[in-house]
Image (spheres, rainbow, N blue to C red):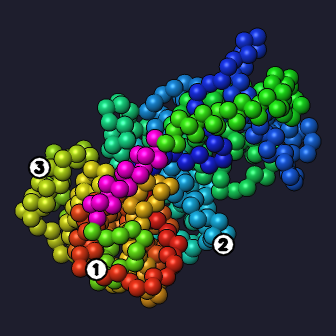
């Protein structure tokens, strides 16, 4: 999972509370948000909000889908919910560029997530069953689009279940909030994912759906900052629709928001820009290559699926992680462990220790540490193995996420092979290497077409090794749109 600010999808919500109207116990800032946003939904043509019945259903959608206060005050719940919401953002990114028939059945993915979120899952039986379904219908070159509707839904429901148990959540939380005591909450993670997918994969079909989308956006917007008072927000929405008392006139509500926006801008913009600028410059100063510049390279890119627990390499893997004392960090069902490794000692030790453990034919160790101090150790299958040559690549700074990406695009033939490889391994972790050096091991969400790839979280040292002796391309063409496949 990438380290980045929480993405608010629908509303721009601001922390803190405004002055309260004591007699009615209304928070003025939250009221102004609800009032002004609801007026915004009425601007222009809106066929969903035409009658009093529509207005009432909109309010009902708001009230019935907001997270309760006890959850919002639980830092572990909120952190995990937030990361689940982020994960859903990655899954839905670029949806608008795809044809409807190219999209997975999100309702089935949501069904698998909801089972985890509501506690209907029995461990480990249900995750073992879900993994079995994924393996059954993704092996032997089988692709999700080749399945009939019922089997496809079963496959993606299993995918949703396993997505809720993806690895590295606790380690990532430690990295984000060191010393906070936040504990990974899989139910909250699954709920955050399901809420975002449910809210944004289909356009609202009714006023209730529209209110529901707003409520889910409030949940997401409350992740990093103080939650707005829902009763006051709803009161503002009712006031805008004429369904309740207008506690604050429209012009005053607008002025409250304008003042708050100005305060937030002054309080956060200089600091945020300064930190981002300093971070970018530190990274830039450590690099031997220039950002946003195409370089001629000569890379041998390979990718193989991470071996599962049934592999012949199982005992060697268990022996290694036991010696390293990281057996508790193993990912269920596969031969891979991820652990927070602040000083890099685990990674350094593992690179020495793996030489002592030979693997059967068709298996290979991989080990590496990313810039977020997470070390990954595992076993990959070398048959079948994706292989391709890369001749042009670049290093790009993404100001939205604060990440530095290494980007490239396969040629037409290799792009087709990559599309086939990723389609055949949806729901599986794939370890990628460049010139025999481990880069990352994401879980494949869906078929990656077009041949464009990117890797983030690489250290400056690893990037410099990749681009050693690389030459700049003259008259570089505009960069292609990149499909990020990294998940963890």
Side (left or right) of 334 relative to 99 = left
Residue 116, image x and y in percent?
A: 50, 43
Mark 1 or 2: the one toward you:
1
Frontmost of labels 3 and 2 is 2
Does residue 454 lie above or below 51 as drawn? below
Is residue 71 visible in the rendered structure shown here? yes
Return the residue nearer the eye: 160 or 51: 51
Residue at disc 1, secondary structure: loop
Query: Which residue is label 3 attached to?
Result: 323
SS at circle 3: helix
Any mark on residue 99, and which?
2
Q: Main secondary structure of the magenta part?
A: helix
Disc 1 designates what residue?
A: 470
Q: Is residue 88 above or below residue 11?
A: below
Q: Quadrant of residue 427?
A: bottom left
Magenta segment includes 285:
yes
Looking at the image, the residue that sits furthest to the bottom is: 413
Q: Residue at x 75, y 51 (%)?
A: 204
Q: Secondary structure at mark 2?
A: loop
Give the residue displayed 47% in from the left and 47% down from the top: 273
N-terminal of the pair, mark 3 or mark 1, is 3
First to last magenta residue range: 271-287
Mark 3 or mark 1: which is in front? 1
> Residue 147 occupies which quadrant of the picture?
bottom right
Task: Give percent across and percent down for residue 38.
Answer: 79, 39
Q: Residues within 10 Å of mark 3 (few under 14, many from 20)?
A: few
């Amino acid at each position: 999972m990438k380290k980045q600010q929480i993405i608010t999808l629908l509303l721009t919500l601001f922390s803190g509370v405004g002055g309260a109207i004591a007699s009615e116990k209304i928070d003025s800032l939250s009221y102004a948000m609800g009032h002004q946003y609801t007026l915004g939904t009425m601007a222009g043509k809106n066929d969903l909000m035409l009658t009093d019945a529509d207005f009432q259903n909109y309010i009902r959608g708001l009230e019935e889908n907001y997270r309760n206060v006890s959850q919002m005050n639980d830092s572990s719940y909120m952190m995990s919910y937030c990361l689940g919401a982020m994960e859903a953002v990655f899954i839905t990114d670029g949806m608008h560029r795809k044809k409807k028939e190219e999209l997975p059945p999100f309702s089935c993915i949501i069904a698998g997530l909801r089972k985890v979120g509501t506690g209907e899952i029995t461990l480990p039986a249900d995750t073992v069953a879900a993994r079995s379904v994924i393996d059954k219908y993704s092996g032997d070159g089988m692709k999700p689009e080749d399945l009939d509707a019922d089997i496809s839904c079963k496959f993606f429901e299993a995918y949703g279940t396993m997505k809720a148990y993806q690895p590295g959540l606790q380690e990532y939380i430690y990295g984000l909030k060191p010393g906070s005591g936040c504990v990974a909450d899989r139910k909250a993670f699954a709920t955050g994912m399901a809420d975002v997918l449910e809210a944004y994969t289909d356009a609202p079909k009714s006023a209730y759906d529209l209110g529901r989308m707003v409520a889910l956006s409030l949940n997401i917007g409350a992740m990093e900052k103080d939650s707005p008072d829902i009763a006051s927000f709803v009161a503002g929405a009712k006031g805008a629709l004429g369904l309740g008392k207008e506690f604050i006139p429209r012009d005053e509500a607008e002025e409250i928001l304008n003042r708050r926006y100005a305060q937030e801008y002054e309080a956060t913009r200089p600091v945020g820009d300064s930190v981002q600028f300093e971070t970018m410059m530190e990274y830039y100063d450590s690099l031997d290559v220039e950002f946003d510049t195409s370089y001629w390279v000569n890379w041998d890119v390979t990718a193989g699926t991470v071996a599962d627990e049934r592999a012949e390499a199982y005992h060697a893997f268990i022996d290694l992680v036991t010696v390293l004392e990281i057996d508790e960090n193993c990912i269920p069902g596969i031969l891979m462990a991820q652990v927070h490794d602040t000083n890099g000692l685990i990674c350094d030790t593992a690179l020495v220790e793996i030489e002592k453990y030979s693997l059967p034919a068709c298996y290979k160790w991989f080990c590496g540490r990313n810039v977020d101090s997470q070390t990954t150790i595992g076993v990959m299958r070398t048959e079948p193995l994706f292989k391709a040559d890369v001749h042009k690549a670049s290093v790009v700074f993404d100001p939205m996420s604060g990440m530095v990406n290494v980007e490239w695009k396969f040629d037409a033939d290799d792009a087709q092979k990559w599309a086939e490889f990723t389609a055949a391994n949806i729901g599986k972790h794939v370890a990628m290497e460049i010139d025999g050096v481990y880069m990352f091991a994401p879980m494949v969400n869906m078929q990656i077409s077009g041949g464009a790839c990117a890797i983030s979280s690489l250290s400056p040292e690893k990037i410099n090794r990749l681009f050693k002796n690389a030459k700049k391309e003259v008259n570089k063409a505009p960069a292609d749109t990149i499909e990020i496949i990294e998940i963890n």
